[in-house]
Structure formats: structure tokens, C-alpha cells
Amino acid sequence: MANIAFIGLGVMGAPMAGHLAQAGHNLVVFNRTMSKASAWTEKYGGEVAVSPAQAAQDAEIVITCVGNDDDLRAVTLESDGAFRTISKGSLFIDHSTVSAHIARELATEGEKRGFHCVDAPVSGGQAGAENGVLSVMCGGTDPAIAAARIVMQAYAARVTHIGAAGTGQTAKMVNQICIAGVVQGVAEALRFAQASGLDTDKVYDAISGGAAQSWQLVNRWPTMAKDEFDFGFAIDWMRKDLGIALNEARNNGATLPMTALVDQFYADVQAMGGGRQDTSALIRRIDRR
């Protein structure tokens, strides 16, 4: 069992860290809101650190799961960041969804300091984290990924090594681009069914086992039909992720017209007060007929 520092105990990080504790690893945790860290240790055990640097002091593996590039830079590279105290030969795994640029930056810094880095964003949402069945897309060296797999099996059903540093984050952008289009399609289809006077439960039964089947259709059609959105992956975070993808597209020359359009649709829902609602709240901007 490993000594692990886990930094970031949000809706994804807290259950992921919980799986590690239940697997028998020794954890020191840090969260900007200290009450969340204290509540986590009351449930799972372990210790609370007062800074990322303290959390990483004696860790063999340091894991982060935070919000954006600035948050990640703060918990790694700033004066009280984890990179100040990570030992040579240790392993750093980042499960945040951030830019490929910062993933490569941290990998370069880790190499200078003598430890391995893996950028490992996840897909599967809060339910996937709680059930320990996340899909992880990884960037880094072969030895780093091999070491990371041993730990990530506690909360992941699938771990895929995409390529060099930063490619895990780029693959996550692909994931979010796909989700944006599918959610918009499901939203339009549901409103079309309602406007046609169809029984949406029967329509769901008819199409969910055929070619239209998708995770979004199976998991979100029933709640979208009931106008239930107070759960899941927040629109505010989805817009952050789509912004990362759109910026990367400007750098690599890809064309993302659908992604840009759906991003603006999500902005409409934010303006309606739905920023903290699930991404399926995209349907709110389409009038019910």
C-alpha cells in the first residue's frame, strides 16, 4: 500500500480518494475548504494537511483533482505547492481537466525535479467516481503510466495511455466535444417528441436500444423529460472545458462549429441561472411546445 497525498476533494476527488482509502492506501488530503477535508477524514480516516506542500511531504504518490489551470498551478508550483516537497522518484497524477499546455509544463518541471508526471483527466461523471468505474485517458511516459495504473484501478474501469505528456488532456477535449453534440441532439429530440404529443417514456424504450443509444440518452432523457437538473456535471464546468477545446482548436487548426454553437447555447442557460445545473439543462433554452 502506498502513502498518497490527494489534493482536491470536490464532487469527483472526494469519492476517488475514498476508493483509495478503502483499498488500504494511507492518505493525507488537502482541500482549499478545510471543512471538506475534515469531513472526508471523519468518513475515511487519514490526515488533513494545511497546504499542498505539507500533503506531499512524505508521499510516494501525489494526486490532484482541481478546477482549472490556475487552480492546478496554485497547488503545484506556488510557494506552498506540492512540487516544492515531492521527493525524487515519486509519482504525480493529475485528474483535473485543464489545458494540454499546463500538463506539458508540469511534466517538464517534474522531469527537472526527478519525478514522473501523468496527466489523467477522467470521464464518467460523479456517478462514475462514486461507483469506481471512471474512464481515464493518460499522457506520460510508459513507466509513469504503468505505476499510475496500479493506483487508478481503485476507481477506474478503463485506463488508456494516449501518448506523451499533454495527450491525456487533449483526449479529454475530444470527449467533451462529443458530449456537447450528443446532449444538444438529445435535447432537440426530446422537445420534438413532446411537440408531437408522443409518450416520451415509450419513445425512450423504442430508441434507447437502437442506433440512437448513448450514455447521455440512457442517463439523461428520463430526467430531462421531468425538467430535473440539480445534479451531475455543472454547466459552468462544461463551458470551462469547451473553452479549453476551442482554444486548442485555434492552436492546431481544427474547425469546431458545432462545439462553438453549443458553447453559446450553454451561455444562454447560464444567463437563465442554470450555471450549476447538469449539462442536460441545455434543453431549458428550447421552448416546450
Image (spheres, helix red, strand yellow):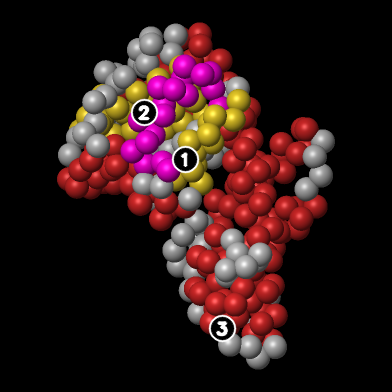
Mark 2, Cα crowd under 10 Å, few <14 / some 14-19 / many 20+, is few
Give the residue at x 33% y 47%: 15
The residue indicated by pointer 2 is 150
Q: Residues within 10 Å of mark 1 (few under 14, many from 20)?
A: some
- Disc number for residue 202: 3
Q: In the image, is 120 to the left or to the right of 90?
A: right
Does 140 appear above or below 9? above
The disc placed on residue 158 is: 1
Secondary element under disc 2, as helix, strand or loop, is helix
Q: State if disc 1 and disc 3 touch (CB < 8 Å).
A: no
- In the rendered image, residue 154 lying in the magenta stretch gets the answer yes
Badge 1 element: strand
Tell me the kind of residue under disc 2: Ile
Q: Is residue 256 above or below residue 199?
A: above
Among the two numbered marks 2 and 1 on one chain, the one whose residue lies closer to the N terminus: 2
Amino acid type, residue under disc 1 in the picture = Arg
Measure the alpha-carbon separation of dots 2 and 3. 44 Å
- Secondary structure beneath disc 3? helix
> Magenta residues?
139-158
Q: Quadrant of residue 24?
A: top left
Q: Tell me, yes or no, whether the highlighted magenta stretch contains residue 67.
A: no
- Front-lying residue, 91 or 47: 91
Percent x, y of residue 274: 55, 66
